[in-house]
């Protein structure tokens, strides 16, 4: 089956290899999205086989899946360290800069992924790019959306409110905020744009992950390409 550019087999290969990194006794960051879901399912099987791991969910969806597959959970505010985080990405470049937030979960994802001793991105080849050029999701306080959109324009971008459906209301994040998907074209300097977005009042978190990932496991048709 082919979804969002990559195949499920490619995603599964990457995610299952990453799940093998988790040793018994570990606290694991559970990412969000279809690729991370394969890792959560693999960890659930490890728990069923006796592995002693506890998960920190990055979203309502990953928490629900972890519960379904039997991974014991601990809440984010109860932990100060995470041993390994396994999370997907919407795009990644050769320096392991990422765009995340396709699932509107990037605020919690960034906290969990950044606090992990080892953050492993799991992806299929369609996510790999020379230059990041997808829209950058911003989680924004609802009342700040017009001000943030204006600031995005001065930074050379165009902000679009994310809607669940064209006719429906806006997507609301797990934190009760809105998402602006911001088109900047090719992002020549991700670190600089990340700094500008972080400094914008009303932005809770942006989807540029610069210097956060330690390695990427990219599932191919016959193996896993490990990038560091
Ligand atoms: C959610 C994310 C996801 O990790 C990202 O959208 C990739 O998802 P998928 O593995 O389904 O392509 O950032 O906020």
Image (spheres, helix red, strand yellow):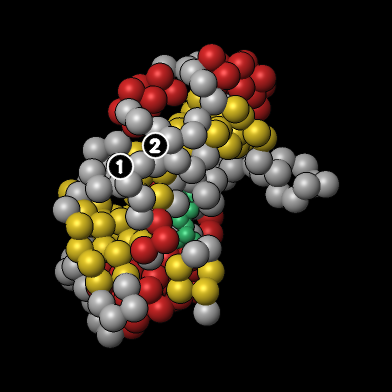
**Residue depicted at x 45% and y 75%:** 8
Residue 49 visible, this orientation:
yes
* Residue 136, horizontal then vertical, whole percent: 49, 37
Q: Are marks 2 and 1 in contact (CB under 8 Å)?
A: yes
160 relative to 84, above or below:
above
**Of residues 191 and 179, the one drawn nearer to the viewer in this rendering:** 191
| Image location (x, y in percent) of residue 145 | 64, 24
Q: Residues within 10 Å of mark 1 (few under 14, many from 20)?
A: many
**Quarter of the image where one finds residue 191:** top left
| 65, 224: nearer the viewer | 224
* Mark 2 burial class by Cα count in 10 Å: few <14, some 14-19, many 20+: many
Task: Kindly report the distance in space between the C-alpha atoms of the residues bearing marks 2 and 1.
Answer: 7 Å
* Count of marks, rendered view: 2
Which label was assigned to residue 44? Answer: none
> Is 146 placed left or right of 168 in the picture?
left
Instruction: Give the side of residue 155 with respect to residue 92, left or right.
Output: right
Left-right relation of 5 to 23? right
Q: Residue at x 75, y 50 (%)?
A: 165
Q: Secondary structure at mark 1?
A: loop
Which residue was labeled with disc 1?
97
Q: Which label belongs to residue 208?
A: 2
């Amino acid at each position: 089956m082919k979804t969002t550019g990559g195949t499920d087999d490619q995603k599964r290969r990457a995610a299952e290899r990453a799940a093998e990194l988790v040793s018994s006794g570990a606290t694991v960051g559970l990412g969000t999205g279809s690729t991370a879901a394969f890792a959560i399912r693999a960890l659930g099987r490890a728990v069923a086989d006796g592995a002693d791991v506890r998960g920190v969910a990055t979203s309502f969806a990953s928490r629900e899946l972890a519960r379904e597959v039997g991974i014991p959970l601990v809440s984010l505010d109860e932990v100060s360290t995470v041993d390994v985080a396994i999370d997907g990405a919407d795009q990644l470049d050769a320096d392991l800069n990422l765009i995340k937030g396709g699932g509107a979960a990037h605020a919690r994802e960034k906290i969990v992924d950044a606090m992990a001793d080892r953050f492993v991105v799991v992806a299929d080849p369609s996510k790999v790019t020379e230059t990041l050029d997808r829209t950058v999701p911003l989680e924004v306080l609802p009342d700040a959306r017009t001000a943030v959109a204006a600031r995005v324009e001065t930074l050379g971008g165009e902000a679009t409110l994310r809607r669940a459906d064209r006719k429906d209301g806006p997507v609301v994040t797990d934190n009760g905020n809105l998402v602006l998907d911001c088109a900047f074209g090719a992002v020549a300097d991700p670190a600089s744009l990340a700094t500008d977005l972080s400094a914008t009042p009303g932005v809770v978190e942006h989807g540029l992950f610069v210097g956060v990932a330690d390695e990427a496991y990219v599932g191919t048709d016959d193996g896993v390409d490990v990038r560091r």
